[in-house]
Image (cartoon, coloured by chain):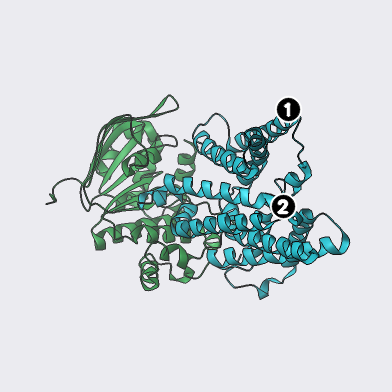
Chain colours: A cyan, B green
Amino acid sequence: MNEDFFLRALLGGLGVALIAGPFGSFVVWRRLAYFGETLAHSALLGVALGFLFHLNPTVGIIVVCQLLAVLLFYSRRQRHLSGDTLLGIFAHGALSLGLVVLAFMENVRVDLMAYLFGDILAIGPADLAWIFGAGGLALLGLLWLWKPLLAITIHEDLARVEGIAVDRINWLFLALIALTVAVMMKVVGLLLVTSLLIIPAATARRFAAGPEVMAVLASLIGCLAVGFGLYGSFQWDTPTGPSIVVAACLLFMLGLLVPRRWLPGSAG
Amino acid sequence: MIDQNQPLLSLAAVNYASGGRLLLENIDLQLQAGEVLTVIGPNGAGKTTLLRVALGLLQPQQGTVYRRAGVTIGYMPQRLQLDPTFPLTVKRFLATACHNDRKRAHRLLGEVGAEQVYDSPMQTLSGGELQRVLLARALVREPDLLVLDEPVQGVDVHGQVELYQLIANIRDQRGCAVLMVSHDLHLVMAATDRVLCLNRHICCSGTPEAVTGHPAYAELFGPLAVNHLAVYVHDRNHQHDHCAHCDRNLKI
């Protein structure tokens, strides 16, 4: 019994780390860290709305994340407020609104900590199916968009002139990120989702000469962080989500200690 | 049947406004196959906007933009802002655009004189190297029309002369048309057939010689530019003079 839930936690964590690698790479290349953060924060509103309409909280998260992605896609076209400011408004507005809505529902008791920091040890078979099903779908989608997304990451207008449907690809990419965030919530919680996207990718950067290598390395480094984090959490009875993030940070710092001459020649 | 006498690109009575400001006013221009047209003008004159309208990246509120059917365009953007975390070598940058044909990527780099950076990360290139690599990328699709937005940006004066020479050679060898933006006229003179002097509207246009003699040109760039241009044309070794001219141009 004990081993069962550890195994499920490990599998769920590894699944999330695998998905986070390639998505996280695009998040750092395209400077979308704050965007991911906003989606994650808004997830709590999704949870609250899920309870309000008697839906599965995960369904609520997906709906709110997708709506927010659409909203952000359009609001970026105006010029009155900078992207940062807009994201800040949406992120904290949605998080606070979620908390307020939850407070109104007196008959609903929510383990807030589980949503904020994740509850990987409570992962059940259904959660595993969700992580690998939806996460796998997101990864397949990313694979399908890979080439045009790289072209857009290099230069949007250049991609447009070369005949790539930039708006449609960007749109699909945001939708996939929203799905990924919803998948990752369970493991690290909404406050730490971005960390699992960004830290392994940033760690992989020094060791990668090309985008694909970096994406795969980021997945592997994320898996290591999940393994060490889970182990540490059991060993010292620390909260699991934060332990995984601490492990990822330690790996990042270790990566910085690797001398430059050991790195592939073309990595910066 | 494509009529070869038809222009590759033509703009007729184009107005483009953004945020309530008219950035382009009543622009007419035509570009024939194999022709080099340079757009010059001070900062904020709408040069880049004009290129973006011509490329179809911006839709003008009034007027028509016509690109000949089936025309292939090679575009060189003004700047490339790659995040330092994006691991991209020159090889890969070019290969993504030509179906991973590495031989071809290498040959194109040779054509622009930048073979030595084939394996370098994009972020480590010097200003001149980056411009050459961007030019190679613009050539990947064997374009009929090259659209170059400030192709000599971030390059010292000596390198600018070389780059303009390179662009002229590319046109001669490939026979493609070129539409480019430049800050000033005197360095680009030898490489261009026609010049269009832009300050939201078209001030004057014609051969480089005709434009330098035009009162609108002197008004836009000041009499100093005209004088220095004369010095430059008569004595190409006057390095100090045309540096002074550049400084002046930057202040406009």
> Local crowd at mark 1 within 10 Å, few (<14), some, or many (≥20)?
few
- Report helix, strand or loop for mark 2: helix
Q: Which residue type carries mark 1?
A: Phe
In this picture, residue A36 sits left or right of residue B152:
right
In this picture, residue A111 sits left or right of residue A135:
right
Q: Which residue type carries mark 2?
A: Val
Res. A104 mark: 1
Residue B121 position in % (x across, y down):
54, 65
Chain letter for mark 2, please: A
- Determine whether A267 is above or below B239 in the image: below
Residue B237 figure quarter: bottom left
Residue A178 visible in the current orientation: yes
- Report helix, strand or loop for mark 1: helix
Residue B57 position in % (x across, y down):
37, 42
Discs 1 and 2 carry the same chain letter: yes
Residue A256 visible in the current orientation: no
Q: Which residue lies furthest to the front in this view?
A: A1
- Name the residue rendered at 67%, 74% in the picture: A261
Query: Disc 1 versus disc 2: distance between alpha carbons?
Result: 26 Å
A114 or B231: nearer the eye?
A: A114
Residue B132 position in % (x across, y down):
42, 60
In this picture, residue B47 sits left or right of residue A178:
left
- Name the residue rendered at 77%, 41% in the picture: A112
Q: Residue furthest top?
A: B20
Res. A188 mark: 2
Residue B59 figure quarter: top left
> Local crowd at mark 2 within 10 Å, few (<14), some, or many (≥20)?
many
